[in-house]
Amino acid sequence: MNVNKLPTEILQQILKRVAMGPEQNMATAAPALRRHLLGVCFRWREIILNMAELWTFNALATLDLNLSRTSSQLLDIYWHTSLDVSHVTQLFKVINTRAPFCRWRSLEIDIDFWHSYRLHSIQSDDRYSNLESLKIHWCQREGLLPLINSTISSNFRSFHNIGAYTPADLLRDRISNIMSRATELTLPNFGAALLPPLPPQITTLSIWSMTLQNTAHIHDLTVHLSPSISQFFDHDWSSLVSLDVLFTRTQHSHPLPQQTILFPRLQTLVVREGRFRPLISISAPSLVSLRLERGHESVEKANRSLFDTISHPSYTVTSMGKLEIGFPLSPMVLASVIRDFSAVELLGFGFDDSYDGWEVIRHVICERRYVKVEWSERLKDNFMAGVKILKLQMNWILGDDAFENPWKEYTAKIFEDIPGKQLETIRCSWPRGDSWELSRLNWEKSHSKVDGSKQEEGHCAL
């Protein structure tokens, strides 16, 4: 289908979706994508230049050019600089004359740490009345944060303070108004004990350590360091839908608590650093997606931790949708995972070496060498029965043709060795972000063409 035959309204939506880039990397991706799209053809260029909302995300280097295309749209400002103090202050004032603070919808600011301590000299009578999101990287906020805190309105929703060296007592004073309005709060360098009591409108929270008092309103929680699963006891988790947590190494030496923590609505769970034993104390009947990462833990220790965890008689955590394990699994551990997570539709795991990856897949999935004799007939029959998507993550394998082509051939071999229609798709992803997939339907079509051509050659020979 020729995309240029689409109506302009539909093509606008497609180009807008592409031009905005990935949400987590809009600051760098969006400008480059827009430049590429502008050079495709005259029609695309006209459409993109006349879509004011595509030019609201502004890096300072292209501020004047983009402002001429934004009409009266609110602006998304990304500011990264290592200029000296006098130039930073002067530049800040110049920006305000061209793009008044009242037009700022979001601000992401990354000023060199050593030059940022005198930003108290920045003064303005303008208000951040439309600011919805503030993200600050690695810089002190001597005057900027109080200025924003004192002038934001009820539109404000999201505050991210990433790696900023601010004393906790000063931070509490300088985000008082922000705290009363934000629904999303990211403070990865601060524990909850250093913060004032969380207002009930905050539903998304990312903090260093888990010492919260009121949790009933939290929907999405990230804890960057949790010394013990016991910190999660005696809290109301009735609203929690997503949990991302890292447990410390000492947790493995502690006896498991006798009680179980119930997360009745939890749908997404991520556990990092290869320390999975605390999962034994978790009950999550609504879980849809489980992701396990080894972080800095060795592959061997992460495998041992995972095997010991899922083999424990009190372990109950399972997933009805996705299970993704971001590190290589030994054949025995992979077989145990497939056995115990028989209901998952997407199964993903990682590889560090092509040969080891092929061997694990061949022995466990294709030949089923690790299906134990002592397993019940039901477990044997259900082995891989629910998996529709197999996701293979290449952690250190370069994604060039020399490596991709053998993997593509081997992917086709997996479909040959696993009969039936249950496994529908195999996906492979590479470290640099490339990915490809093969569906059973496409494989069957190409397979039938190959067989057909062979038969024709046979008839010709006869």
Image (spheres, rainbow, N blue to C red):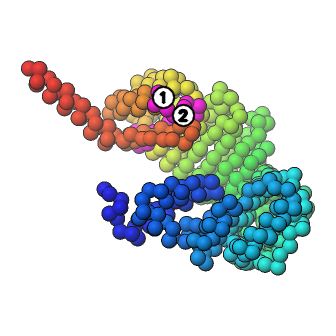
* Tag 2–tag 1 contact (CB < 8 Å): yes
Q: Is residue 348 above or below residue 46?
A: above
Query: Residue 388: within the magenta?
Result: yes
Query: Residue 166: within the magenta?
Result: no
Task: Determine the image quadrant of residue 69.
Answer: bottom right
Does label 2 or label 1 sit earlier along the sequence?
A: 2
For image coordinates 63% across by 71% down, the residue present is 67
Left or right: residue 157 compared with residue 462: right
- Crowd band around label 1 with a 10 angstrom C-alpha radius: few (<14), some (14–19), many (20+): few
Residue 347 appearing in the image: no
Q: Which mark is residue 403?
A: 1
**Quick one: 159 or 377, which is closer to the camera?**
159
- Crowd band around label 2 with a 10 angstrom C-alpha radius: few (<14), some (14–19), many (20+): many
Q: Could you tell me which quadrant the C terminus lies in?
A: top left
Q: Which residue is mark 2?
A: 394
The x, y position of residue 240, in whole percent, is 65, 59
- Amino acid at dot 1: Phe
Q: Could you tell me which quadrant the N terminus lies in?
A: bottom left
Q: Which residues are magenta?
A: 385-402
Left or right: residue 414 compared with residue 91: left
For image coordinates 58% across by 34% down, the residue present is 395
The x, y position of residue 388, in whole percent, is 41, 43
Left or right: residue 393 compared with residue 410: right
* Mark 1, secondary structure of its residue: helix
